[in-house]
Amino acid sequence: MRKLLPIAISALILGLAACTPSAGPAGAPDNPAADPAADVPAAPPDEAGVRMIPISTPKGDFKVWTKQVGDNPRIKVLLLHGGPGATYEAFKPFEDYFSPAGIEFFYYDQLDSWLSDQPNDPDLWTIEAAVSEVDQVREALGLDADNFYLYGQSWGGMLGMEYALAHQNHLKGLIISNMMASIPAYNDYSKNVLQPQMDPDVLKEILDFEAAGDFHNPRYMELLMNSYYTQHILRRPVEEWPPEVLGSFDHMNGEKYLAMQGPSEMGAGGSLVDWDRLADLHRITVPTLITGGQEDTMDPAFMAKMAEEIPNAELNICPDAGHLTQYDNPDCYFTGMIDFIESVDEGETE
């Protein structure tokens, strides 16, 4: 559940560049040259490692964008981004850590995300459709139980759990990052733990905006950015956020995000509001890593409980890190993942 409203973050990016916000909910800015995300250009289809994977759906055939980085016949990691409707861009730090470790991985924009086809059909915005898509991507890329590690962050972590419950026979390992196995529990954590940490006057003003449905108000965005996101999403001033992070939010599919995530930035709603898989985690038997940040929007104690429920799971919670742990504490985050992957590869977790 990447917690930035697409409309708000587009306005934020443009505001930082001192230009007028775009009228569209997640569209391109009026002046691309003033957009920080312009530093992250769209990858040309013929770029090395890029493949457009055909996907069959009940609503027709489409293509999704993938890019292979590295080459390791035993270790291949497919990265599932957040949102729903965000992009692969915030995974750029993986090149700095996975590549030197000899780990092959795949960037992947899910259907209706930036570089992939965008039918924008709400009938396809379901967990079942997303799981089917991931399995078709897996098969096309030649991933199987001998080499296939599935990594999912935020919404991607939810999707990773669902994929494992449906198709873990194809997995060698699973990494669930920055995600709880229950949206109701996540909402409770936001309401009862994170929100009370905020300045009471600021919290009241934010909640008043939400009660009025005034989610596009610039003041609402400003309060969230300075009192919530810089504490729990990416723990640095917004002016210091990397261009690829800003690009991921600016390129987000706002319609898909709002339909599944919902409009409120203080908790999840939309079609995923009742999703809860905690009672099913014991069915995941492949080696699994649960990871996230101590200051995450996701409850570290709940993530620890998830690790207890999965029979063959490890836990790595990184200090002084929020929802984008790969930027806040990359050494802890990537060391934990690399150690996990190498231990699975060497058979130490069997």
Image (tube, helix red, strand yellow):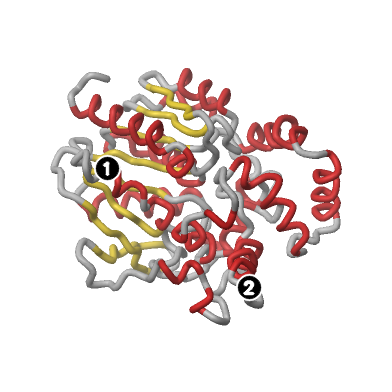
Compared with 264, 163 (above or below) is: above
First in sequence: mark 2 vs mark 1: 2
Report the residue marked by disc 2: 18
Q: Residue at x 76, y 57 (%)?
A: 220
- Tell which residue pokes out farthest to the bottom in this image: 30
| Residue 28 relative to residue 46: left or right | right
Residue type at numbered disc 2: Ala
Q: Secondary structure at mark 1?
A: loop
| Residue 192 relative to residue 291: left or right | right
Image quadrant holding the C terminus, namely top left
Residue 319 location (% of width, % of height): 51, 28
Report the residue marked by disc 1: 98
Compared with 187, 290 (above or below) is: above
Q: CA distance from mark 2 to mark 1?
A: 36 Å
| Dot 2 crowding, Cα within 10 Å, few <14, some 14–19, many 20+ | few
Front-lying residue, 336 or 154: 336
Front-lying residue, 274 or 186: 186
Q: Is any part of residue 19 visible from this angle? A: yes
Residue type at numbered disc 1: Phe
Q: Is any part of residue 350 visible from this angle? A: no
Residue 315 location (% of width, % of height): 43, 24
Q: Secondary structure at mark 2?
A: loop
Compared with 301, 142 (above or below) is: below
Q: Residue at x 45, y 40 (%)?
A: 162
Q: Residue at x 66, y 77 (%)?
A: 20
